[in-house]
Image (tube, coloured by chain):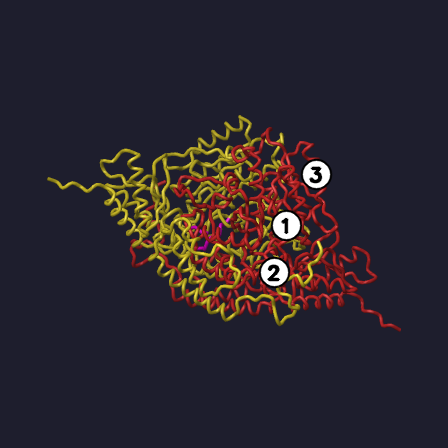
Chain colours: A red, B yellow
Amino acid sequence: MSAPTPGQFPDSSPVDDKRPPFADMDVESFRHYGHAMIDWIATYLGDVERYPVLSQVKPGEVRAQFSQQAPEEPGSMDALLQQVQTAVLPGITHWNSPNFFAYFGASSSGPGILGELLTAALNTNGMLWKTSPAATEVEELTLDWLRQMLGLPDGFHGIITDTASMSSLLSIAVAREALNLDIRQQGMAGRSDVPRLRLYASEEAHSSIEKGAMALGLGQQGLRKIPTNAEYQMDDAALAAAIAEDSAAGWRPFYVAATIGTTSTTSIDPVPAIAAICRRFGLWLHIDGAYGGVAAIVPEFRHVLAGCEDADSIVVNPHKWLFTPIDCSAFYVRRPDLLRRAFSLVPDYLVTDEAEVTNYMDWGVQLGRRFRALKLWMVISYFGHRQLANAIAGHIRLGQQFADWVDASPRFERLAPAPFSTVCFRAHPQGIDDEAELAALNTGLMEAVNASGAAYLSHTKLRGVFALRLAIGNLRTTYRHVNQVWELLQTALDGLLPPVPPTV
Amino acid sequence: MSAPTPGQFPDSSPVDDKRPPFADMDVESFRHYGHAMIDWIATYLGDVERYPVLSQVKPGEVRAQFSQQAPEEPGSMDALLQQVQTAVLPGITHWNSPNFFAYFGASSSGPGILGELLTAALNTNGMLWKTSPAATEVEELTLDWLRQMLGLPDGFHGIITDTASMSSLLSIAVAREALNLDIRQQGMAGRSDVPRLRLYASEEAHSSIEKGAMALGLGQQGLRKIPTNAEYQMDDAALAAAIAEDSAAGWRPFYVAATIGTTSTTSIDPVPAIAAICRRFGLWLHIDGAYGGVAAIVPEFRHVLAGCEDADSIVVNPHKWLFTPIDCSAFYVRRPDLLRRAFSLVPDYLVTDEAEVTNYMDWGVQLGRRFRALKLWMVISYFGHRQLANAIAGHIRLGQQFADWVDASPRFERLAPAPFSTVCFRAHPQGIDDEAELAALNTGLMEAVNASGAAYLSHTKLRGVFALRLAIGNLRTTYRHVNQVWELLQTALDGLLPPVPPTV
C-alpha cells in the first residue's frame, strides 16, 4: 500500500492553517440555530398533544419527500429545519404526547433532553476510565443512586446499556460464563462435553429473553416457557417441575428470568418462590423489571421487588418510566467479575495501567460507550427521588382510575389484574358473545381510536383473546387525558355498534 | 396481586387535573436553560483546545464531589450546571479537542449535535415502522445516501446500530444463520450434528470480531487469526491454506472479516483476493471499515473499498470519521431476509398488518431504537458530500504531512505504512538500539505529551514493538495542531534524553 500523494485530492491547496479544508458550523450560527431549536422544542413539548399521536402517513410518504440522491452540495440550516417540519414531523408517532397509551410509555423530560444535548456536545467515548473518567464515575454514581431508590441492597453493580434487550443478553451471557464450561474460549459448536443448556422464563416474559437465547447460540428450544396462573404470573411449581424434568432428561438448566411487570399484562412473577428454586437447583436468577421495576422507587411499592435482593442480575429501564430520553437501560449484576470474564478482551492499543478503575468496555459487547449517565444524573438530580416517586404513584393511581371505569361499565370488561399503570380490557357489550365477533369489534375500536389521532392504544392477546392495552407512563399524562381516552372509547364504540332501537 | 388502593400513595390527593402529581420543567425554564446550554456549548466548542485533552483527575475524584446518597429533594438547574462545570468537566477527556490524536477520532459537529437534541426531544422508539415512520424511512434514506457516497452498489441494505461492535456481532450472527444449521431454533449446545464453526480475521483485526465470536458461543478458538504481511495486511494465501486445513480437520469455516483500516496501523486487507477465496469456499465476507471505509467518500480514495462490492456485509462508523455524535454505526447487508431470519421474533403485542414496511426491530438484537438517523441526516444534508470528502481528504493530507516529518527526522522513525490519516511511529535517537530502552523512552514520551494536556496520543504494539499512534480525524484539527504536536514531541524528547555534551 503506497502512501497517497497530495496531488490526488480534490482540494489540492497546500496544507496550511489559513485555509482549513473544512470547518464546522460557525459559533454564531450554532448559537442562532441552537436557540431556534430550543424554542422549537419548548413549543413542541407544550403543544405536543395537538399532534395526531400515531403518525398518519402511508408507507413511503416520508422518504418520497427527500432527494433519493445523496446531496453533493451543502444545505442551509433553514432549509433543513423546514424539512424537519414538513417531511419528518408528519412521520413522527408522538411518544412524548400525553395521549400516548401504547406499549409502555417513554417520555423525555426537560432535564433529560438537556442532558442528552450536553452528551452530544462533549461526545466522549467512555470505553476506558481514562477516556473520560467522568463518564465512568457518573455512571457508577448514578446507578448507585438508582439502586438505593429501588431499595436494592449493596452489592449490585450497575452498567448502562442501550436497551433491556441488550441487558437481557448480557444476563444470559454472564450466567453461561458462570457455568465454567469454558464457552468463552472453546464455544459450544461441535463440543460433546457441553450439555444442552436450558433457560426458563414464563410464557408472558418479554421476547428479548428468547432473542438473547437465539443470539447466544442457545436456540429457541433452549428457552422453556413456563405456564402462568390465572393472573399471568409464572407458576413456580411448574418451574420446579420443569427444571427437574429437564435435568433428568439430560439438559443443564442454568438460568431463570422472572419478570416484574410483564409486557402484556404487567403481571409480577412470584420472585421469592422462584429465588428459592434457583437456590435449590443452582440457577442464575435474572429479574426483568424493565418497566415495573421502576415502581419500586415509590416506598409504598417497594414490595414489587420483593425477593429481588436474592437475584443475580436485574434490569430496570430509566428510558421507560423514569423520564429519561431513550436509550438508557440500567443493568445490575452481583458479580461484575463474571461479566468481565465473559467479555473482557483488551488489545494492545487499549492496555492501560490503572488497576483500580472500572473500564466499562470489559463489561459487555460494545466497545464504544456514549455518556448516557449524564441525562439520568440530570433527571434524578433535578427532580429528586420524592418527586419522581410521586410521578410514578400518580400514574399508578390514574391506571387504577381507568380500571375502575372499565370495571363499572356494562359495555367493557377487564381482562387482567392491573398491578401498575397498565390496563388490559376490551369492549364486551351485552348480546355479543362470539369471540371472533368480539375480536373484530375491539380491533375496529382500537383502529378508530388510533386513526382519530387523539390517542394511541396498543393491543395484545391473552389466552387467545384480543385485548386492548392502555399503558400510562408519560410524564405529561394527567387525569384529563385518561378521562378523554375513556370518553373517546365510548364514542368510538357507539359508532361501531348498531343504533339502539327506540323502545316502543 | 391485588390492586393497590389510592390511600397507599405518598400524595393522596384526589385525582384531578388541577393538581398533577408531577410536572416537567416548565416551558419558560426549558427555554432559559436550553439557551444557556446552547451558549455554553458554543463557547465550549470554540474554546475546547484550551482544556487539557486527557483528563487529569485521579480515580475517584469525580465521584467524590457528589453526594453518595440519592437526592431526595429537587435540585435547581443552576446548581446542576454548576456541578457540570466544577465536577464533571475536569473529568472529561476532550474527544472534541483538535488536539485529540488518540485511538480514532470521534468528533461531533454542530448539525450533528442539534440533530441529537431533536432526537431527544422527539424521543421516538422506531422499533416498528408505525411507531414512527419517519425514524425508519429517514434511516433507510440516509443509509442509502451514505452507500452512494461510499460508491457501494445497489443491493446493500442499511441499519444503524450503536457501535461497530454490535454491527460485527450482527454480521457473525447472520453468517451463522446462513449456514442453515437451525441454530436459531436448536442452538449449538449439546448438538452432535453441528460441526465446530470457524471464523477468520487477520491478527490485526479489531477485538470486536473476537468478542462477537465469544458472545455468540463460537469461542475465541472459533476465530482463527491469519498472519499479516510486512505491511500488516492479511496474508490471503495463508487464509486459503488455513481454510483448507481447517476443513480437512473437521471444522466448518463460514466467515471471514476483512478490515479496511485496522486499528493499530490502518492497514487495508487485500479484499479482492479475500473475496475470491470466500467465493471459492462459500464463506460469508464481512468488511470492517468502521474507520477506514469512510475514506471511500473521497472519490480519489474510493479504491480503499475495492472488492467490497462482493462482500456480504460491511460496517462503517459515521460516529468515527463523519462528524456525527457517538453513537452511530452503519451496518450494510445484502440479505436482510437472513438478518430477519436470525432475529425476527414478533410477540402478539407487536403484531402489525403493514406488509410492505421495514420493522427494524426484526434486524437485530435491540427492540428499542433511538432515532439515530436524524443526526446523520443533518450532518450529510448540512455539509453535503463534497465538503465531507474535502474534510476526509484534508485529514489524510495532514497525516501524510506528519508521516513526512517523521520520515525526515533523524530522531524518529515510522513503524508502518500510513494509508489514511493515522501514523505509527516512535522516537529512535541515534545510539539507542536496545528494544527495552526504546520502549521505555517512548512510553515516557507518550506520558509526557499526554500529561501536558496539550495533546493526547495513544499507543499500540507492532510485532512486539511499542509504537506511538497519531490519528487525525477530528473536524477541528488543522495544520497548526498537527504541527504543534510534532513540536511538542521534539521538546518532550529533548527532556527525556541526556543533554548533548558540548563538542570540545
Residue name at image x 60 percent, y 69 percent:
A50
> Amino acid type of disc 3?
Ala
Give the label, 1 or 2, closer to the camera: 1
Q: Earlier in the sequence, mark 2 or mark 3?
A: 3
Disc 1 designates what residue? A306
The Cα atoms of the two marked residues, 3 and 1, are separated by 23 Å
* CB atoms of marks 1 and 2 within 8 Å: no
Q: Position of residue A409 (x, y in %)?
A: 77, 65
Give the structural element (helix, strand or loop) at label 3: helix
Q: Position of residue B459 (x, y in %)?
A: 36, 42
Q: Position of residue B261 (x, y in %)?
A: 41, 43
Chain identifier of the residue bearing label 3 in the image: A
Residue name at image x 82 percent, y 62 percent:
A430
> Amino acid type of disc 1?
Ala
The reply to whether residue A430 is in sight is yes
Disc 3 designates what residue? A242
Q: What residue span does the magenta drawing correspond to?
A: B318-330
